Amino acid sequence: MPTAGDILRRFRFHGVPGAPATSGVPVDRARQVALELAPLFALLEDTEQHAARIIEHATQDAVRQRAAGSEEAQQILAVARSDAHAARAQSAAIRLDAAEAERTALLAHARGEADRILRVGNERIPALVEELVGRVLAMGEHSTGLPGKSGPGSTRLGSNKETR
């Protein structure tokens, strides 16, 4: 395949063929090159116009595709924002349901523990009252020697004074 330099060398003026002449009209090289290339440039003019139309159509298509892509991106973004809002609401509802279930379980456990404490207390009260009464009576017998009487060194119920 010829290089660009080989093609351009073809259009260089090397001299007039034949024997050298002493007189004559100088050659207009620029005009000769223009006349030689004019049919080629005329053929390329249609190709250039066709290429310009292709570029114009491609530019218009690119603008339409960019606008359509931008609109589609905005729609996708709007759907994603809506979905994110719905997902946050759903997540919050799930957390609230879990918290409510935990609260209910804790409340049931607390009620059961309160019932157990009340039951144990009610079971122990008669025995504790009996033991307390026995100790109080024993304290009274121990200080006086007789049940129901107080003597020196003992305190009477309801009295703040000690007798000596």
Image (cartoon, rainbow, N blue to C red):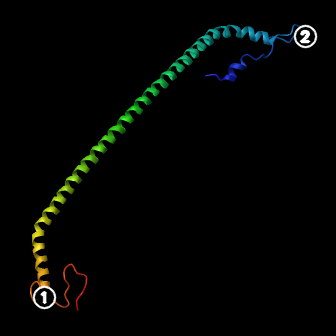
Pick the residue in front: 127 or 143.
Answer: 143
Residue 138 drawn at (x, y percent): 11, 84
The type of residue carrying mark 1 is His
Residue 93 drawn at (x, y percent): 31, 40
Pick the residue in front: 100 or 45.
Answer: 100
* Residue at mark 1: 142
Pick the residue in front: 32 or 159.
Answer: 159
Circle 1: is it few (<14), some (14-19), or many (20+) Cα within 10 Å?
some
The type of residue carrying mark 2 is Thr
Dot 2 falls on a residue whose secondary structure is: loop
Residue 121 drawn at (x, y percent): 14, 66
Labels 1 and 2: the sequence-earlier one: 2
Which residue is depicted at the point 22% across and 53% down? 107
Picture layout, residue 75 above or below residue 100: above
- Locate residue 86 relative to residue 116 in the image: left or right: right
Which residue is depicted at the point 45% across and 25% down? 72
